[in-house]
Image (cartoon, grey):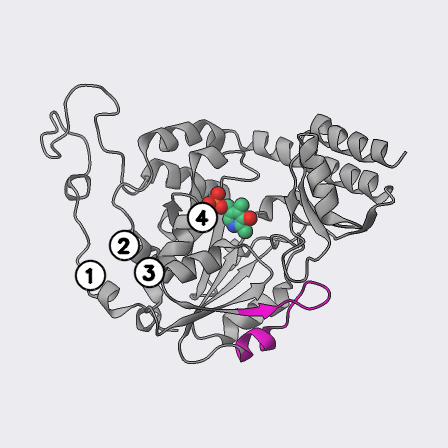
């Protein structure tokens, strides 16, 4: 697999911006190289463009090498950079499962790249062959989201592996919800598949959506391309500093996840008991996709009570469904009590 053949020509030949912090690394007595103001410490200084402290720690936690990590301004940046690095506008295309996370299509549209959807089957699953059938010589990326948003289930790992072995472009596996899943991450397979890109995020299990920090994991070669085209200082100093304490105590995250998994089961059981609930789809994530009798009516009544869920009725294959995030025990009780009262 020759990754360099997949890169857009202008990106392959690009001379990246070289910032002061790239040209000189290390300790010094005085920094007079970046036209910074010497006052207002510590925010007067530019942040580390490659976030080395964070990556060292993340590498330990995730069992990868620091050079296999890219940090972005949310997963949104990792998604956008995949298009900008590999997809020639109006020439190349990408293939994705449907329904899935909306940002892949938005990013494709912004970059003027054709987005080909392959509908999931009745079990919200797919066969590698049907995705490969949608590909042609201009297909650069395949997007898989596992566990998938909004369906909640994990995608079949044997089919993902078949894609990694047979597809001649890059396979992006978005694992935003992997911490809630019973299935293992594909991170352990990075060295085996040079065309694998795994996206994760600090926005869900790590409780840090407000910090905007997404992760992309891939070969050093692919991460090198990402680093070449990203904004030089894409992660600000506050975000880098705020995340460190959490990275030092991952047991905190494991404790949150344990509570949320218990609550997911309790919420599912409570919803199942309601007459208006027709089906609860199996979930490997921190939300439930729930089919109800009157999705729009129920959604609006919940809004009237100040309870906001996500209406997915308009999404193909999710007709009749609401997507409900698992909250704290108290938040889940408010939802369940409200719904129960309405059935009296
Ligand atoms: C929530 C979510 C993300 C997270 O996006 P960020 O930009 O990192 O907050 C990524 N992928 C999927 C599928 C999601 O549902």
Q: Residues within 10 Å of mark 4 (few under 14, many from 20)?
A: many
Disc 3/disc 2 C-alpha distance (Å): 8 Å
Q: Report which residue position mark 1 lands on.
A: 14
The numbered mark at residue 84 is 3
Q: Residues within 10 Å of mark 3 (few under 14, many from 20)?
A: many
Of mark 3 and mark 4, the one earlier in the sequence is 4
| Depth check, front residue: 221 or 228 | 228
Q: Report which residue position mark 4 lands on.
A: 75
Disc 2/disc 1 C-alpha distance (Å): 8 Å
Percent coordinates x, y for residue 95 in the rendering? 50, 69
Of mark 1 and mark 4, the one earlier in the sequence is 1
Image: 35 above or below 78: above
In this view, the residue farthest toward the right is 344
118 is within the stretch colored magenta: yes
Q: Could you say whether the residue bearing mark 4 is in a helix, strand or loop?
A: helix
Q: Report which residue position mark 2 lands on.
A: 229
Of mark 2 and mark 4, the one earlier in the sequence is 4
Q: Is residue 190 visible?
A: no
First to last magenta residue range: 117-133
Q: Quadrant of the C terminus?
A: top right
Of mark 2 and mark 1, the one earlier in the sequence is 1
């Amino acid at each position: 697999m020759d990754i360099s053949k997949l890169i857009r020509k202008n990106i392959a030949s690009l001379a990246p911006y070289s910032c002061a912090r790239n040209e000189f690394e290390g300790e010094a007595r005085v920094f007079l190289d970046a036209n910074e103001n010497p006052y207002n410490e510590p925010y007067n200084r530019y942040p580390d463009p490659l976030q080395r402290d964070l990556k060292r720690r993340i590498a330990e936690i995730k069992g990868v090498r620091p050079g296999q990590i890219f940090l972005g301004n949310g997963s949104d940046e990792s998604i956008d950079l995949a298009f900008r690095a590999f997809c020639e506008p109006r020439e190349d295309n990408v293939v994705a499962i449907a329904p899935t996370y909306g940002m892949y299509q938005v990013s494709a549209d912004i970059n003027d790249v054709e987005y080909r959807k392959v509908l999931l089957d009745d079990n919200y699953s797919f066969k590698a062959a049907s995705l490969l059938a949608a590909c042609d010589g201009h297909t650069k990326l395949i997007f898989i989201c596992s566990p998938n948003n909004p369906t909640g289930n994990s995608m079949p790992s044997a089919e993902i592996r078949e894609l990694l072995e047979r597809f001649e472009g890059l396979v992006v596996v978005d694992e935003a919800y992997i911490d809630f899943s019973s299935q293992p991450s594909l991170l352990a397979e990075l060295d085996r598949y040079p065309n694998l890109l795994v996206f994760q995020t600090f926005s869900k299990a790590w409780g840090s959506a407000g910090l905007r920090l997404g992760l992309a994991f891939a070969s050093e070669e692919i991460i090198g391309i990402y680093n070449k085209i990203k904004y030089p200082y894409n992660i600000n100093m506050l975000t880098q500093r705020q995340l460190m304490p959490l990275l030092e105590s991952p047991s905190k995250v494991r404790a949150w996840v344990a509570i949320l998994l218990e609550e997911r089961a309790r919420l599912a059981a409570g919803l199942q008991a309601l007459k208006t609930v027709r089906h609860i789809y199996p979930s490997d994530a921190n939300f439930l996709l729930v089919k109800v009798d009157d999705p729009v009516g129920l959604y609006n009544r919940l809004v009237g009570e100040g309870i906001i869920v996500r209406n997915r009725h308009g999404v193909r294959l999710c007709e009749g469904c609401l997507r409900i995030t698992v909250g704290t025990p108290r938040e889940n009780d408010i939802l369940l009590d409200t719904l129960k009262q309405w059935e009296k």
